[in-house]
Image (tube, helix red, strand yellow):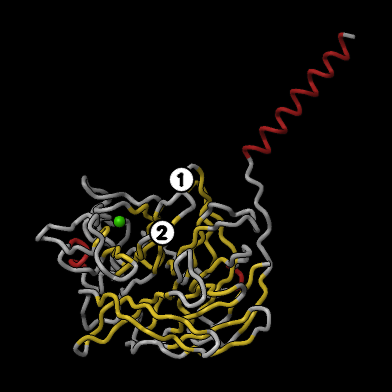
Amino acid sequence: MLISKHRVCRLSVFLIVLASLAAATKVVAEAPKVDVVVTGLDRPWGMTEVAPGKLLISQKAGSFVLVDVATRAKTVIAGAPKVIDDGQGGLLDVAVPPEYKPGGWVYFTYSAPVQKQSATALARARLNLKSGLLTDRQTLLVTTSVTDTSQHFGSRIAFDDQHVFFTVGDRGVRDNGQNLKAHAGSVIRLKRDGSVPDDNPFVGRSDALDEIWSYGHRNPQGITFDGDGRLWLIEHGPRGGDELNLIEPGKNYGWPVVSQGKEYWGPIAVGVKQKAGMESAAKVYTPSIAPSSLLSVEGDRYGWQGDLLAGALVLTHLNRIEMKDGNPVAEIRYFEDKKQRLRVMAEGADGTIWIATDAGELWALR
Ligand SMILES: [Ca+2]
């Protein structure tokens, strides 16, 4: 009787130890399989699902293409604005708001020609799938980010239920980061029609632009809302020090006063590591992965619900940032063996995740 009690007890202890081991040890599922849906895209940059299995993709040189995942057909969509396709500039992001229905507004960013130079701009148009046309195009904002460099345009788009947000890089002019009289180096928040919301943080201040939501950014190329309405942004550091930031209105994210990276030309730190009044990054990548885009995963098809995905360019992989209680807690890298620069991800209404690569491939994760 005693022995058997002991055995039961020891068995229970053993089971408890097993259970706690399982809880403590993250079981890393295998990487999903990559199904190459189409090849031959011309430098895809932005991607959004406009009808089930139909992806509108922006191509950097200044064109849109629609990919029907089921038939693998590609259709050119006319109506893109004139862009400066040079260096990091060109036709950039394309995105639709969460409530999008056929005939609704499609938003896109691009490098707009401004007096023989260029600036990041936001526009919208209506997509007619039958005619293959974007019509009724409206330029919503040509930002004050004009330079003759071809660097650091940003630019990704995100939506909450009333506004459109987009990112603008510092345009290769570091001082833009702290300059509230320039859109460069900022996250911009507008009403959907391009007008300025009354509750933007700098409205009414003569020393700042009304459109700015946050500033002190170097080159943010990913922005996404998570399921709890938090706005996340990922940006390129100088050499080392790419950052994931939690964006809050009016806050200063430090560039170029604060950075975790070094100059490209030598082992000299850029700025200081932290400073009062400037936000520290939620996560830092050193060495740089060169993040291209950011997606908060809504569905649970891959066991990634609530996690953030970043595409990586230089360190060719898909970066999954595991989130817990609103914080990044771990990082898993997928598809490094494919050696492809991953430019942008989109999640379909059915939970499928698609990835477009600089080599012109569109992947579906299976
Ligand atoms: Ca920063």
Task: From the top left corner, tell me how far across and down residue 165 is, in percent.
Answer: 34, 64
Q: Type of residue at label 1?
A: Gly
176 sits to left or right of 135: left
Instruction: Give the residue drawn at x 61%, y 70%.
Output: 337
Q: Quadrant of ligand 1?
A: bottom left
Image quadrant containing the N terminus: top right
Crowding around mark 1 (Cα neighbors within 10 Å: few <14, some 14 to 19, many 20+) is: some
Image quadrant containing the C terminus: bottom right
Task: From the top left corner, tell me how far across and down residue 42 is, in percent.
Answer: 50, 87
Instruction: Give the residue drawn at x 59%, y 87%.
Output: 74
Q: CA distance from mark 2 to mark 1?
A: 20 Å
Judge: label 2 CB < 8 Å from ligand 1.
no
Secondary structure beneath dot 2 equals loop
Checking the image for residue 161, the label placed there is 2
Task: From the top left corner, tell me how far across and down residue 12 is, in percent.
Answer: 77, 23
Discs 2/1, front: 2
Instruction: Give the residue drawn at x 65%, y 83%.
Output: 72
Which residue is situated farthest in the right direction here?
Answer: 1
